[in-house]
Amino acid sequence: CAHSITGLLIAAKRDNPHDMLYLAYCFLNGIEVKQSPWKALRMTKKLAKSGYAPAQYFFAQWFCASEKSKIGNYYYDEAAKQGCTFAVNRWIEKRSDDAESLPEWLYLSADSGNETAQLFLGKCYLEGRHVAQDYKQAAAWLKRAWELGDKNATKLLLECYENHFPECCDEKY
């Protein structure tokens, strides 16, 4: 542990969520304390219920052996709403096919620089999946992901320009 256990215990008593989650990790793995997965689970659950996104993500992982886990999916969604990149990316990978529409937090995550969310939105607008097909929106989101270095965005952006020019461009040609 980077911190002393004594320091972590003091921080945990002061309700420092970052240190509390790290202490839970120590209990889970028996690092400088007697291993206690149940204690780790209780601490993580308390943090998840308080709204701490990293704890919501880790708590959800405990319950998502099954993709249909209501508890796990609830906490993944809660973490995603707060912009937890791992939770957003997991939603895209595992649950987006079941969605009737795109959640607002997905746009917020993309606006905050999550290139996976940007790429996903670009593909959705390109294909007309979950949203009305819109080549300008597709190109805009794909360009943002491309600017962050996403190689898949490069391919899709070129495809968009090749197959849907000029309707994918903002400028008049």
Image (cartoon, rainbow, N blue to C red):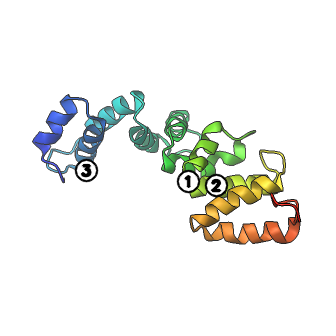
Kindly identify which residue carries mark 1.
114
Callout 3 crowding tier (Cα within 10 Å): few <14, some 14–19, many ≥20: some
Q: Residues within 10 Å of mark 1 (few under 14, many from 20)?
A: many
Q: Residue shown at 49%/50% (left/top)?
A: 86
Quadrant of the rendered image containing residue 164: bottom right
SS at mark 3 in the image = helix
Disc 3 to disc 2, C-alpha distance: 35 Å
Q: Amino acid at mark 1?
A: Asn
Q: Residue at the front extreme?
A: 172
Mark 3 or 1, nearer chain start: 3
Disc 3 marks which amino acid? Answer: Asn
Label 2: which secondary element: helix
- Disc 3 designates what residue? 29
Q: Which label sits in the foreground, 3 or 2?
A: 2
User: Residue 77: which quarter of the image?
Assistant: top right
30 sits left or right of 131 in the view: left
Locate residue 49, reporting x and y percent: 41, 28
Q: Decide: marks 1, 2 in contact (CB < 8 A)? A: yes
Q: Is residue 22 above or below residue 122?
A: above
- Type of amino acid at the residue the image marks with label 2: Gln
